[in-house]
Amino acid sequence: MAIKFDAYQAEQDLRSQETELACFHCGEQCPDRSIAIGEKFFCCNGCKTVYEILNVNELCEYYEIEDTPGISPKTDIVADRFSYLDDESVRSQVLEFSDGSIDKVTFHTPAMHCASCIWLLEKLHDMDPRVISSIVNFPKKEVSISYKREEMSLSEAAALLSSLGYEPLINLDTVGKREQSSAEKKLYLRIGLAGFAFGNVMILSFPEYLSRVGDVDPVFKMVFGYLSLLLSLPVLLYSAKDYYSSAWAGIRSRTVNIDVPITLGIGMLFIRSVWEIVTRTGPGYLDSFTGLVFFLLVGRIFQQKTYDLLSFERDYRSFFPLSVTRKINNVETSVPVSKLLPGDRIVVRNQELIPADSVLLKSNTLIDYSFVTGESDPVTKQAGDFIYAGGRQVGTTVELEVIKEPSQSYLTQLWNNDVFNKPRFSRLNQIVNQVSHYFTIGVVGIATVAALYWLQFSAETAIKVFTAVLIVACPCALALSSPFALGTALRIFGRKGFYVKNTEGVEALSKVDTIIMDKTGTLTENQHETIEFKGSVLSTKEQQAVRSLTKHSTHPLSQKIFHALGAGSLRAVAAFEELSGRGLRGTVDDCVIMIGSASWVQLTQETQSVEDMKTRVYLRIDDEIKGYFLIANTYRKGLRPMLATLASHFKLVLLSGDTEREKPTLVNLFGKEDDLYFRQTPEDKLNFVSKAQEAGAHVLMVGDGLNDAGALRASEVGVAVTDDVSAFSPASDAILTGDKLNDLDSFIQMSKATMSVIIASFIISILYNVIGVGFAVSAKLSPLVSAILMPASSISVVVFTTLATSLRAKMMRLT
């Protein structure tokens, strides 16, 4: 009989092991052991396939990030499941970019849920060599994939994600439209359910409330207690589900997030209430439990709406500075990109950005898509070809017809492309990460000690104290101070004509101690110079040839010469070339025209004269040097006091590509002769910035974004000063309109003031937590009030940082 019992027990143990067998990939229970690779068992063939893909590509360290991190595909991978995406009409809606060799698409992947998901999705290029890169936007649950068009189709890109368990959610009816997210809809549903339960549990608790003034039949108490328990179950299982999921995900990834103490508090209240109702030892705290969940959820939605109201991103994008030349009835006018409409004809010159999806109307051209893809090789386009927004025109001026309204958010996204981002160390982020790491563990410890202390007096008080401490403490305000203060500064800067591309730029600006400036186009104005030609008299044909060549350049000196030569017909330019810091070359009517520096036109010796205070631009036609354009620079108004103010706070340096002709004037402006350098090539400027940084300087480079793009990119903060925002430089961290150059010191001081506001908000957040936890530990704070105070603390800190930053800006006359 004992043998039979042992056999039966062994069989039961085996069944139990099979029942509890977890899938090696996703962690869900396996129905049996039939799907396995060695000692690794899987719940379905989809999980097994994903593991095989990872194993073949030597990416199994994915499973070291956390145990069973994957998402189960649940269904077998069907090869033609996404074949509809390869239809050209569908493909054109879904793709963000295509240059014939590289396609770029962004998929919404709701199954993305943890750090290991990010790790895996950004390793797609290791799994499939046809994928060039993949970048995850975790808050939006999006992954952007760039892949080789000739080797991979759009449907195969979607299938690759699906095979890993991250099936993309594609809704063609809402491409490019913003809808209320399903998560937000669920949040409202959870709030409604919790509110319904809270109200009814309060009504069912009346017998207990009334028992203080008279006896209530125990049967009523029991019935109402069980009814309250029944109403509370959906709140526990559905309304509060997000807190459990987040807490469990954190624990699985070996971190303790803010939802862990909230989950503990909610669980403690519910378990204690169930115990009292079932054993009839008390009424429980289900009214407090449902109210706690209700107010937590209401706080969450109110908090989100407050953030949306104060959000800088939407406003900031509307300030994104980009203009374009629109042509109507052969008349060219500069208009903001936001004014472009489908059907408009635009004119784009050499090195200018194409702001909207367009069709090339005339001639052939080269488009540089490095702004979008990071690949620097230009792509040949012919008349009638489709050109995506974000490309750069290379060569002579072209005309295009806009076929799709420009997206300023897309252009801002391009500006923030990783290709142009700089490695920066953020002390603020380091502090927030360190505090957040230890905060929750400390709160749980304090709550436990306080509960043990009060337990010797009253179990009811101990539970309330434990729950109140866990709920009232919140590091969210600490984490939100920085983005909202810096975001407010971004918006204020944008309204004053100073466009910083991201919040990291504002923080970096607050640390600068050295300012390096270019001269032409930065300290000088482009519209008010006088210009004359010295040398051989130019014929009408020669003037037209020079004007035709300079039209294709965005350099300030080229544009001055173009406008100085007056109106007249333009000729076609062949073999156009523009070398930064040197000059232009092109062939017009079989004549080779060269315009630029003395060395560019191969002048062996430059003569000196009384006109040395002016800038010279030499002209060579074929083998003859015709002379030079003499341009009298006009310096911006208010330059001397502005430079004096900057010199009192920072080390000032001038790097100019011109000769020493204007040195006396510049010495007068800068107040000293030191740190004024002339004949600086773009390479010289870059090397100067690098050496200054090696010596420990934090450099702000201020230039026109044309001849000093390398220096702008190398500096901690690169500011491109421009009077024509169509000359947009992605290498810069900020764009400053020329008429606002005098406010540069105010912008820097404002960035420093913003950092002070952030520190003050940190202190407020810490004080709130100390005071709140103090009241909770002393049993003077109920869990319900704690649930109201927790989101209120975040909202108050966000409002403080926004208002304080705005007030400092007003004091500096920036608003």
Image: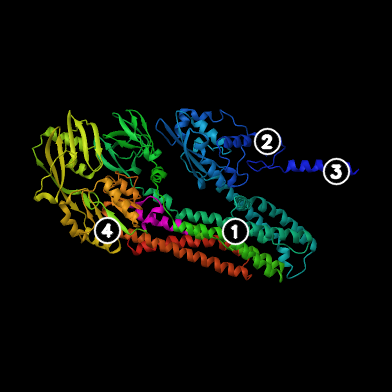
Amino acid type indicated by mark 4: Leu
Which residue is at a point 29% across and 39% down the rendered structure image? Answer: 351
Q: Which residue is mark 1?
A: 295
**Element under disc 3:** helix
Q: Which residues are magenta?
A: 481-509
Q: Residues within 10 Å of mark 2 (few under 14, many from 20)?
A: some
Amino acid type indicated by mark 2: Ala
Q: Earlier in the sequence, mark 4 or mark 1?
A: 1
Q: Which residue is mark 2?
A: 36
Distance between the Cα atoms at labels 1 and 2?
A: 47 Å
Left or right: where 458 falls relative to 545 = right
Q: Which mark is residue 149?
A: none
Instruction: Measuring from the top left, give residue 62's x and y in whole percent.
Output: 57, 43
Disc 1 versus disc 2: nearer the observer: 2
Is 153 above or below relative to 281? Answer: above
Q: Which image quadrant is residue 364 in?
A: top left
Distance between the Cα atoms at labels 1 and 3?
A: 54 Å
Q: Main secondary structure of the magenta part?
A: helix
Q: Nearer the viewer, residue 110 or 21?
A: 21
Q: Earlier in the sequence, mark 1 or mark 2?
A: 2
Q: Which residue extends farthest right?
A: 1
Distance between the Cα atoms at labels 3 and 4?
A: 88 Å
Instruction: Measuring from the top left, give residue 1's x and y in whole percent.
Output: 91, 43
Amino acid type indicated by mark 1: Phe
Residue 745 in sight in this render: yes
Residue 565 in sight in this render: no
Q: Earlier in the sequence, mark 1 or mark 3?
A: 3
Q: Which mark is residue 6?
A: 3
Quadrant (top left/top right/bottom left/bottom right) for the C terminus = bottom left
Label 4 with label 1: CB-CB less than 8 Å = no
Q: Nearer the viewer, residue 218 or 11?
A: 11
Label 1 with label 3: CB-CB less than 8 Å = no
